[in-house]
Image: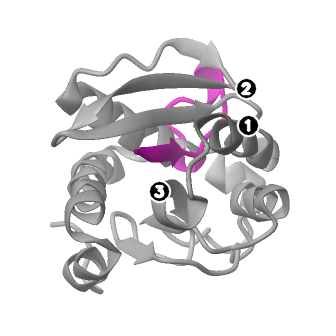
Amino acid sequence: MYIIVGLGNPGKDYAGTRHNIGFDVIETLAQRANISVIEKKHKAMIGKGYIEGQKVVLVKPQTFMNLSGESVREVVDYYKIDETEELIVISDDISLEPGQLRIRKKGSAGGHNGLKNIIAHLGHDEFQRVKMGVGEKPKGYDLADYVLGHFTGDEKKVMEKAAAEAADAIVMMMMEGVEPAMNKYNKKNKVE
């Protein structure tokens, strides 16, 4: 079983923002697999089903980004999974170009408060993640304002393709392992 967590903030105000790209990838996976992410449980919206014959729990924490670990800890404990092998977390990353993916087996939070809180609640940083590039904040911008801002028209198209590519990468991570997915998707060029 895999628990796939897309990070974001709850509520209409945050829909379509850079910080909510994790929610967008969860929605992409849910639509493809015909899974409804509507059950309120573990401080999250969750949906259970199968992707390529693999049992999955899709999770959108509703704790707000900085407290994502509370929800992740509850889900991991409830389903008794090995989070080093069966947890995949999707987050935004300002150090990557819009649409660029970076898959990791483990690692630091890299300044991302959602990942920082998950690491604090799990007590380690050894879980798989898919980082979604949202672009660097422009000079003079407040970081919070930037990540809580909406994508431009052109960026929206790029990010829709990137969400689809991230969904493909996650399926590959589950079916073939994280290494092949890293080799295929951790390339410099962004989605065309």
Q: Quadrant of the N terminus?
A: top left
Kindly identify which residue carries mark 1: 74
Residue type at numbered disc 2: Lys
Kindly identify which residue carries mark 2: 43
Q: Do the residues labelled 3 and 2 touch (CB within 8 Å)?
A: no
Q: Are marks 1 and 2 in contact (CB under 8 Å)?
A: yes
- Judged left or right of residue 168, residue 47 is right
Precedes in sequence: disc 3 or disc 1: 1
- Please give the name of the residue rendered at 69% of the width and 73% of the height, measured from the top-left corner: 125
Q: How far apart are marks 1 and 2 (CA)?
A: 8 Å
Q: Do the residues labelled 3 and 1 touch (CB within 8 Å)?
A: no
Q: Few, some or many C-alpha atoms within 10 Å of disc 1 (few <14, some 14-19, many ≥20)?
A: some
- Judged left or right of residue 38, residue 70 is right
**Colouring chosen for the image of the structure:** one colour
> Can residue 150 be seen here?
no
Kindly identify which residue carries mark 3: 86
